[in-house]
Amino acid sequence: MKIPNNPYFCAMNYAIEARQLTKTFQQGKQNAYTALSAVDLRVGAGKAVVIQGASGSGKSTLLTILGCLAKPTSGEYTCLGERVSKWSEKFLTTFRREKIGIIFQQFQLIQGFTAFENIALPLIPLKLAYPTLEKRVHEAAELTNISTKLTQKVELLSGGEQQRVAIARAIVNKPAILLADEPTASLDSENASQILALFENLKNTGTTLLLTTHDVRVATHALVDDIWRMQDGLISS
Ligand SMILES: Nc1ncnc2c1ncn2[C@@H]1O[C@H](COP(=O)(O)OP(=O)(O)O)[C@@H](O)[C@H]1O
Ligand SMILES: [Mg+2]
């Protein structure tokens, strides 16, 4: 939703709050391009929001900023009550690892590593005992229907299988916020509905979800609380 005028909304608990977020690539150069233009948004804790918009409208740029992977050129971002702009890189890395799961549009899996190793990556810094790590990976793999491919190198998997590995990796840390960039784009109907059911379960356990999609299967799903439209770096509800 867009920020309402009602002052009582300020007292609500938001997982994501952004004010006047702007991102200009190549700033100051002749080919400068503003991909986000003063975006205001709020996502209530435990809510699921879908962002729709044409290719190039700024969806992925927004998600990388909300995922604390890139800084906005200007504007303020408050994530789970913490002002992101105030944080050191070190704190940001830990915070991101513990609180945010991201499913990238291009999956960003590590080639040459198995599905198991890719899913396990976010757990490595936690220095868990190996049986605990293994259990967590198997749980995430089961939820995403990829258990039978865990020993396979990721580059040998199909697009849909790679997408499910990427989803498993994003949820293996049980994040408070799950950001997903076109999460069902490579999935057939059966796997898409399974992933949407998984997202619904995560939401029921309190996870906040922000999904970009072109997929009507996502936008029309019962889990979605709100749909926003993005155009030329601007959001409308
Ligand atoms: N690193 C970058 N440098 C310059 N322009 C970029 C960069 N990343 C994205 N853009 C541009 O910003 C716009 C928004 O891109 P993106 O956020 O990927 O849109 P979407 O995900 O909605 O397709 C596009 O015009 C894209 O070319
Ligand atoms: Mg994109």
Image (cartoon, rainbow, N blue to C red):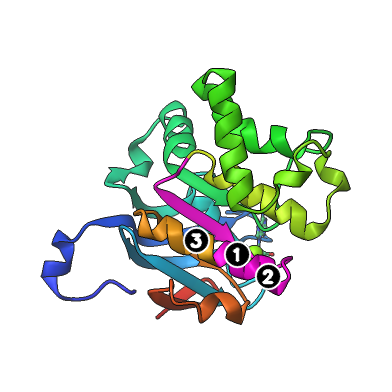
| Residue 222 falls left or right of residue 25 | left
Q: Please name the amino acid that badge 2 sits on.
A: Glu
Q: Mark 2 points at which residue?
A: 190
Q: Which badge, 3 or 1, is on the more N-terminal residue?
A: 1
| Residue at the (63%, 32%) spot, across then down | 121
Element on which disc 1 rests: helix
Q: Dot 2 surroundings within 10 Å: few (below 14), some, or many (20 or more)?
A: few
| Residue at the (53%, 25%) spot, across then down | 132
Q: Which badge, 3 or 2, is on the more N-terminal residue?
A: 2
Corner quadrant of residue 24: bottom right
Would residue 64 be seen by someone viewing this image from the given angle?
yes
How many labels, in total?
A: 3
Would residue 34 be seen by someone viewing this image from the given angle?
no
| Residue 36 falls left or right of residue 104 | left
Q: Which of 54 and 143 is in front in this view?
A: 143
Element on which disc 3 rests: helix
Q: Mark 3 points at which residue?
A: 199
Q: In this view, does 121 lie above or below 126?
A: below
Q: Dot 1 surroundings within 10 Å: few (below 14), some, or many (20 or more)?
A: some
Corner quadrant of residue 192: bottom right
Q: Please name the amino acid that badge 1 sits on.
A: Gln
As for residue 184 lying within the magenta part, the answer is yes
Mark-to-mark CA distance, 3 and 1: 9 Å
Would you say the beta carbon of the disc 2 residue lies within 8 angstroms of ligand 2?
A: no
Q: Position of residue 150 (x, y in %)?
A: 75, 39
- Specify the farthest residue to the right: 156
Q: Where is residue 20 in the image (x, y as percent from the top left)?
A: 37, 63
Q: Give the range drawn in magenta.
A: 174-196
Would you say the beta carbon of the disc 1 residue lies within 8 angstroms of ligand 2?
A: no
Q: Is residue 55 above or below residue 98?
A: below
Mark-to-mark CA distance, 2 and 1: 6 Å
